[in-house]
Image: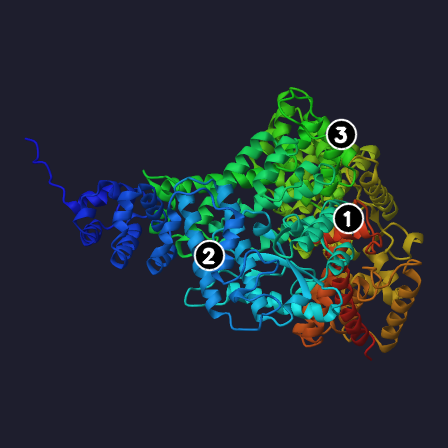
């Protein structure tokens, strides 16, 4: 049996129609009277409003104030639709209409109000003569004006302004005006308000007639694409009248400008209009509010930054002396279109992009439609930058408004047609959302609300009625994602069309335009870059098709890297080697993070690029941070040992496999280093461990070879003792392996025979690791052995002991502080370190004479070994406060105290300093200063090798190389001087500590 039909109440029907509170809506309709309750056309317009409840509330208040409104509605349905449409979006305009019901006449059907009409109306509202050359509020003229209070005029200005704002909103919400028309009319209205405010300023300012003052609109006001509520950006230009002193005229103009700004921003019972922002003027807040035309031009020619020329793209006369304003606009126009040729244009552009991203307040990024990712600023920045780059040679691009400029860029082939269409749609959508957010309470905001009721109002205002919140959120996120995607490709996609042999479906960039764009984006060899792009994308193969998809984004990432040209060249070389490998391009296409990391590495490090070119399949390692983690020593030892075993007696082939393993691990470590996954101490340990493993495997291969050649078992045990930075587990990418070889003959083997075999293995180990090969060699240096290069390469422990007991000098004891077993027979290695412990850790410390000798030795080394012409403040090893200063301090502390303080018995510099501080032998503040300098110098030495692909101890004097190293260390593009200043500051402090501690008796 069917259920009885449910009887729906009036409140229920109203809720079903779209009212959030049906019962309240029923009560408010009843209060409007019987003629309203039966007016279905009225109900239809209420339901069509973005927020029917809000529209009904404002209507109820208005009818209570002026009951004739309902009759006017029946006489003019268009008036009703426009008013209720505004009421459904704007509490603030609803309040205004309730206070001033006479403004309803402005919603009657009329053509779009002209700039002249609005100017006349607002001037009349403040009592000024619209036909006067320089209108003065209050009915006076410049000749008769007396300074007077402007209270009534400012209130009248606000009432008239809001009435016209209501008119524009009515046309907007009903679709009678497009977004572009509404934004242009809002800018014209703002210009009219500025003119009226200037008239108020003249009424307040004595001697206002002594100066000509022009108001230049900037930003959205200048471009005629203004929001409903926004700061209005302006610049003031003034000239004295004939016979008037310039200084006095500028003082008068400043008071006049301040009066105009107050007339707009002062709060009255009718509220305020908006802030007038003059911060885009030369020198910003620090500069004078008003300048002469000559002063403006002199500043722009000599001092202006690129962002200031970007701002001047929008400059337009809006109020005041029109002739002077046009002179200003004409003069700056020529300068704007030469900005892309300025020396620091690329650096400025990069800084501007960072500034845009940094301006997003924390916690708002996901809801910011202006500054957030995929927001309005992304579109505006991209369009303006392309205008600056290409407008120099193409006058058709010289447009102020974003949408018209975007259309011109598309017609000229500077932006792809589909990309321009998608950006225009997104821009229009985001501006509509911005208008609706601001209209609600006439407040300046760009943050999409999170409240469901607010989102519902916005969605319905955009015509989304089925699921307003869901539809709006989905559409907004889709547009934001599309803008972000296109913003990353916008500069680069047309470059591919300029070089690829593709069917002509639209205009394409000329070679000159493509070159100009690449130069502007940081490529120093744009012709070479275009050749690489052509080589990668030409043809109809699947590989070329994927590259055409990849390259626009890759080119953007290269441009963000320190060396875009090197990045693109490296990418072409790696792609040439791996292009036919099915997984390579698929990995880059499907894993954005991998492609971005690869672009950054190739554009930062020639060292990494070189490693990758000889083992391109290592790209797969970039797939996840876990792949870049330093591998455990045991794993490396096992893999290296397996390679040696696999190749048997063929030592050359075995060591080639081991060196390939080392190359792969060097790549892993360098990538982790540049990605910030490991710090400099971890880098040093990883490289030292890798060298230990490599030496062990090479020595094993050498023993196999020597044993096979001798046709008998190897007659002695051998150990390799690491020295220097290898011993301290502080290896750099460029470090040699400082070692000493020790052996112990097996029982019954004559010492001579054992020594010969050990010598052969040591020589073979060194030879195998330095053979010419694609892989980085590991130079094994035994120069720290007793008697240096004149002494035997290999000794027994007894021979070492005899030498040290009889002949050793203090510097050798100091060198032995780094001695550590690293390869071969572990028991023999321990025996060696046990044997040298009394020498390097003397029980009573070293004598005063020994301390003096070490101090003299350091002074001599510093004077003799620093390269001729080297800047001692920039030499990371031997310079002031560099590695040597810190390491000699640590080693002297060890020689003096490690015999009594076991914590000091370490081969690591920072470990020794920390132990000395913990044991009270070094002030903790001094330890911190020394450690900071050591870490800084070590990072810079490694960065030099990573960036240049070759070692150096000094920070380069060449500005470009220094900038690349600074970028690799995390400094911004313009941070090269900060990088040098930071290093000098850190090492200057370390030098002061080192001299005090090292030479303190």
Q: Earlier in the sequence, mark 1 or mark 2?
A: 2
- SS for dot 1: loop
Instruction: Quote the CA–CA distance across marks 3 and 2.
Output: 57 Å
- Residue 715: which quarter of the image? top right
- SS for dot 3: helix
- Residue 268: which quarter of the image? bottom left
Q: Which residue is mark 2?
A: 161
Q: Residue at x 57, y 73 (%)?
A: 147
Percent x, y for residue 260?
Answer: 57, 64
Q: Which residue is mark 3?
A: 531
Percent x, y for residue 449?
Answer: 41, 52
Number of numbered discs on residues = 3
Percent x, y for residue 273?
Answer: 48, 60
Q: Which one is in front in this view, the residue at disc 3 or the one at disc 2?
A: 2
Q: Which one is in front in this view, the residue at disc 1 or the one at disc 2?
A: 2
Q: Earlier in the sequence, mark 3 or mark 2?
A: 2
* Quadrant location, the C terminus: bottom right
- Residue 191: which quarter of the image? bottom right
Residue toward you, 728 or 73: 73
C-beta proximity under 8 Å, tags 3 and 2: no
Percent x, y for residue 817?
Answer: 77, 63
For disc 3, the neighbor class at 10 Å (few under 14, some 14 to 19, many from 20) is few
In the depicted structure, whether residue 630 falls above or below residue 441: above
Residue toward you, 116 or 311: 116
Q: Which residue is mark 1?
A: 342
């Amino acid at each position: 049996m069917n259920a009885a039909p449910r009887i729906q109440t009036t409140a229920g029907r109203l809720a079903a129609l779209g009212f959030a509170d049906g019962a309240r809506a029923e009560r408010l309709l009843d209060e409007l009277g019987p003629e309203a309750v039966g007016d279905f056309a009225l109900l239809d317009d209420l339901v069509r409003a973005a927020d029917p409840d809000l529209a009904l509330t404002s209507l109820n208040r208005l009818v209570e104030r002026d009951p004739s409104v309902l009759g006017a509605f029946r006489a003019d349905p268009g008036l009703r639709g426009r008013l209720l449409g505004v009421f459904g979006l704007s509490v603030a305009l609803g309040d205004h209409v309730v206070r001033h019901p006479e403004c309803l006449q402005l919603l009657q059907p009329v053509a779009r109000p002209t700039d002249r009409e609005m100017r006349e109306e607002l001037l009349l509202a403040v009592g000024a003569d619209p036909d006067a050359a320089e209108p003065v509020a209050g009915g006076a003229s410049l000749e008769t004006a007396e300074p007077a209070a402007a209270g009534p005029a400012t209130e009248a200005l606000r009432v008239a302004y809001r009435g016209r704002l209501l008119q524009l909103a009515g046309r907007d919400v009903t679709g009678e005006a497009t977004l572009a028309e509404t934004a242009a009319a809002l800018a014209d209205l703002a210009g009219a308000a500025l003119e009226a405010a200037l008239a108020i300023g003249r009424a307040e300012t004595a001697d206002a007639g002594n100066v000509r003052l022009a108001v230049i609109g900037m930003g959205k006001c200048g471009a005629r694409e203004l929001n409903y509520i926004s700061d209005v950006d302006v610049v003031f230009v003034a000239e004295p009248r004939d016979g008037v002193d310039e200084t006095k005229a500028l003082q008068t103009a400043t008071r006049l400008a301040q009066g105009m700004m107050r007339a707009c921003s002062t709060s009255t019972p009718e509220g305020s209009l908006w802030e007038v922002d003059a911060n885009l003027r030369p020198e910003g807040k620090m500069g004078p509010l008003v300048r002469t035309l000559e002063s403006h031009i002199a500043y722009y020619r000599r001092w202006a930054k690129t962002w200031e020329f970007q701002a001047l793209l929008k400059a337009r006369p809006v109020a005041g002396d029109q002739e002077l304003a046009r002179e200003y606009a004409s003069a700056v126009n020529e300068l704007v279109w030469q900005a892309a040729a300025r020396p620091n244009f690329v650096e400025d552009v990069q800084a501007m992009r960072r500034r845009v991203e940094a301006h997003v307040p924390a916690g708002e990024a996901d809801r910011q439609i202006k500054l957030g990712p995929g927001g309005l600023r992304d579109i505006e920045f991209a369009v303006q930058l392309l205008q600056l780059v290409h407008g120099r040679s193409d006058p058709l691009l010289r447009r102020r408004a974003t949408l018209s400029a975007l259309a011109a860029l598309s017609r000229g082939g500077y932006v792809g047609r589909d990309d321009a269409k998608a950006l225009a749609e997104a821009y229009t959508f985001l501006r509509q959302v911005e208008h609706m957010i601001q209209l609600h309470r006439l407040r300046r905001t760009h943050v999409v609300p999170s409240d469901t009721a607010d989102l519902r109002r916005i969605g319905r205002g955009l015509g989304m009625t089925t699921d307003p919140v869901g539809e709006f959120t989905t559409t907004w996120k889709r547009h934001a994602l599309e803008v972000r995607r296109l913003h990353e490709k916008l500069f680069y996609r047309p470059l591919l069309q300029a070089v690829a042999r593709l069917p002509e479906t639209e205009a394409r960039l000329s070679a000159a335009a493509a070159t100009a764009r690449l130069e502007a984006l940081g490529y120093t060899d744009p012709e070479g870059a275009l050749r690489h792009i052509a080589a990668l994308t030409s043809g109809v193969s699947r590989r070329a098709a994927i590259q055409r998809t990849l390259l626009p984004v890759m080119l953007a990432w290269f441009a963000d890297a320190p060396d875009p040209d090197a990045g693109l060249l490296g990418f072409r070389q790696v792609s040439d080697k791996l292009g036919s490998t099915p997984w390579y391009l698929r990995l880059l296409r499907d894993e954005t993070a991998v492609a971005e990391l690869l672009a950054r590495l190739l554009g930062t490090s020639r060292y990494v690029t070189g490693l990758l070119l000889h083992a391109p399949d290592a790209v797969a390692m970039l797939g996840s941070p876990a792949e870049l983690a330093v591998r455990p020593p045991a794993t490396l030892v096992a893999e290296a040992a397996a390679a040696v075993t696999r190749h048997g007696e063929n030592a050359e082939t075995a060591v080639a496999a081991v060196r390939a393993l080392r190359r792969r691990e060097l790549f892993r470590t360098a990538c982790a280093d540049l990605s910030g996954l490991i710090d400099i101490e971890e880098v040093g340990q990883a490289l030292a461990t890798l060298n230990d493993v490599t030496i062990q495997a090479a020595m094993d291969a050498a023993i196999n070879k020597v044993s096979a050649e001798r046709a008998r078992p190897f007659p002695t045990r051998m150990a390799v003792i690491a020295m220097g930075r290898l011993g301290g587990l502080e290896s750099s990418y460029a470090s040699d392996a400082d070692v000493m070889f020790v052996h112990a003959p097996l029982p019954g083997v004559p010492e001579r025979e054992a020594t010969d075999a050990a010598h052969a293995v040591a020589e073979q180990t060194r030879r195998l690791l330095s053979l010419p090969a694609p892989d980085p060699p590991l130079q094994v240096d035994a120069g720290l052995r007793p008697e240096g290069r004149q002494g035997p390469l290999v000794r027994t422990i007894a021979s070492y002991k005899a030498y040290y007991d009889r002949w050793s000098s203090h510097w050798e004891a100091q060198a032995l502080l780094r001695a550590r077993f690293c390869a071969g027979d572990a028991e023999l290695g321990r025996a060696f370190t046990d044997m040298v412990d009394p020498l390097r850790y003397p029980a009573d410390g070293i004598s005063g004479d020994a301390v003096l000798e070490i101090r003299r030795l350091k002074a001599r080394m510093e004077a003799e070994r620093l390269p001729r012409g080297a800047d001692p403040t920039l030499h990371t090893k031997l310079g002031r406060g560099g590695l040597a200063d810190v390491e000699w301090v640590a080693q002297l502390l060890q020689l003096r105290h490690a015999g009594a303080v076991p914590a000091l018995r370490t081969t690591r510099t920072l470990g020794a300093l920390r132990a000395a501080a913990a044991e009270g032998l070094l002030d903790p503040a001094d330890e911190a200063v020394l450690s900071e300098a050591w870490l800084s110098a070590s990072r810079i030495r490694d960065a030099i090798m990573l960036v240049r692909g070759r070692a150096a101890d000094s920070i380069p004097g060449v500005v470009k190389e220094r900038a690349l190293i600074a970028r690799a260390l995390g400094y911004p593009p313009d941070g090269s001087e900060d990088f040098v200043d930071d290093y000098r500051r850190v090492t200057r402090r370390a030098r002061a500590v080192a001299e005090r501690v090292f030479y303190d008796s």
